[in-house]
Image (cartoon, coloured by chain):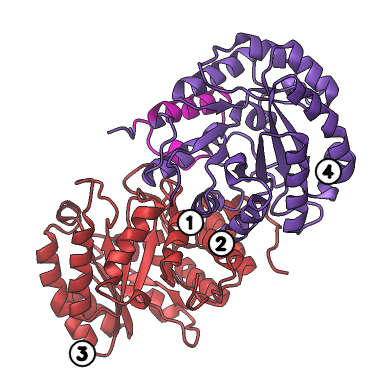
Chain colours: A red, B purple
Amino acid sequence: MSASDFVRIVEVGPRDGLQNEAAEVSTATKIALIDRLSACGFPVVEATSFVSPRWVPQMADAAAVLGGIARRDGALYPVLVPNEKGLERALAAGVREIAVFTAASDAFNRRNINCDIDESLRRLAPVVARAVADGLWVRGYISTVLGCPYQGRVPVNDVVRVVKALDAMGCAEISLGDTIGVGTAKKARAMLEACATEVPMARLAVHFHDTYGQALANVYACLEAGVRVVDASVAGLGGCPYAQGASGNLASEDLVYQLHGLGMNTGVELDALCDTARWINAELSREPASKLARIANERRFAG
Amino acid sequence: MSASDFVRIVEVGPRDGLQNEAAEVSTATKIALIDRLSACGFPVVEATSFVSPRWVPQMADAAAVLGGIARRDGALYPVLVPNEKGLERALAAGVREIAVFTAASDAFNRRNINCDIDESLRRLAPVVARAVADGLWVRGYISTVLGCPYQGRVPVNDVVRVVKALDAMGCAEISLGDTIGVGTAKKARAMLEACATEVPMARLAVHFHDTYGQALANVYACLEAGVRVVDASVAGLGGCPYAQGASGNLASEDLVYQLHGLGMNTGVELDALCDTARWINAELSREPASKLARIANERRFAG
């Protein structure tokens, strides 16, 4: 592994995670979670979502969450924005970083946002254009890059096509998501490398789900290919909506343990992160989903 | 990844797994488990242990288990043997494959078998010599190759020294065990490659525990280095005796999913293996420890 040894972890627990948890979470708990994650040292914390409260009532308090958090200097707090209306609400809340989303699968997009890939890109273009014109940092999420719960196989070329489109719109970073966690290491790496022929590796991120236990092996293979931005969720928040009871997001603490073991830097303090994972598990009356959170409570990783 | 695409999985659930489970397991259930694993296609199933029933009462029925199983042609059924007395019992039971064990850590050996590494090697030598003279296939296990619960760091040179000693005794295969699961991919690969300077890679196996979620990433890194024998335990049987509640052995079904995804062959039928994992979890009234066993019951992987 060459290049920089710094891996930027994008902590997605407060948004991607909580949105997929069954428990109701108060605004105060959301704020406390983001503040704890900031204090752990995460350079990016995805804070909330300005989707319609009719569709995602868990995120109706987006503006209140953003108003309540203590921003750490230099950290980014992107919010998810599905359309121009969401962007307006985000801008009114003073947001400086947003994330937009689509999928590499027509079948998934049709079920999720009621249109195919091309139509979804057409809808996103003016949102991204306006955000970029306003000086915002824009992240593009692509779901189902290694498989789709509805159509099955997703050709790598379909992923590359969406990467190119998001890049052309002005996305600063593009996150490649294995939404259902079916990918294995060689396929993950090949997909990433295909995308990196179109967009510089430094602007690509990987987003793995641990549904089949493959997330960290996939991360390792993609680190070997040069990726240095990895998404993860504290405590593995966010189950898998496509397989009941299964694991969803890769747990940040398992990722940090791996990266530090590989000699990479993350800026994240692992003991504080494990404390945060245990705290949010208790708040949500939730069984630990990460390996590290299952280890005896008082185990310390520093030193 | 070059060389052969066949990975030989050594299924250790019936011995290493059950020995570390709290539940009492009947002889009939042990036999049924081994027969199911044989039917899944595992080329090697570690069947039981001829340790003293005073120390490990769970394995007092070793001879009865071996007498009851249906052997699949070509498959190996090694049993653990701690000393000459154990070897005699094993030979009396008609065993043709045995495994012996030591550690790369003096502190671990002192706590586990009440002697340091050198003394443990001296005790093993006549056991292996007699087994080899009798035409048995002998596997050597080395524990704590990437860390020790008592002494902490384990130098790679200590592992290499034990590998050389077991090789010199006549062990056909040497399994490198990260007993407490603390290793990460680059350290695992470096340790394996150091051992492979002394013993051909084809005679080395890796044995990872998933305590920190690193097992499959470590497997992947070691596959890249050329290893083609990997130990795993159906359903992740065998918790971690050094960290209460934590995961222990890598689950065979998660490993098979990975290997097949990497385009490797194992001879193991994944659907049958998942059925076996669910069955033994139910028999032991045990929560699923593997990712695959947590996925909705009726998910099929064939086709």
Residue span colored magenta: B271-298
Q: Residue placed at 37% from the left, 65% from the top?
A: A206
Whole-angstrom CA distance, mark 4 to mark 1, is 31 Å
Of the image marks 1 and 3, the number of the one nearer the N terminus = 3
Of the two numbered discs 3 and 4 in the rendering, the one whose residue sits closer to the viewer: 4
Q: Chain of mark 2?
A: A
Residue that numbered label 2 is attached to: A258
Foreground pick, B2 / A4: B2
Residue that numbered label 1 is attached to: A216
Of the two numbered discs 4 and 2 in the rendering, the one whose residue sits closer to the viewer: 4
Residue A131 lies left or right of residue A205; in this view the side is left
Using the rendered image, report if marks 3 and 4 lie on a common chain.
no
Q: Chain of mark 4?
A: B
Q: Which mark is residue B109?
A: 4
Q: Amino acid at mark 3?
A: Ala
* Magenta stretch: helix, strand or loop mostly: helix
Q: Residues within 10 Å of mark 2 (few under 14, many from 20)?
A: many
Residue B54 lies left or right of residue A278; in this view the side is right
Q: Is residue B295 magenta?
A: yes
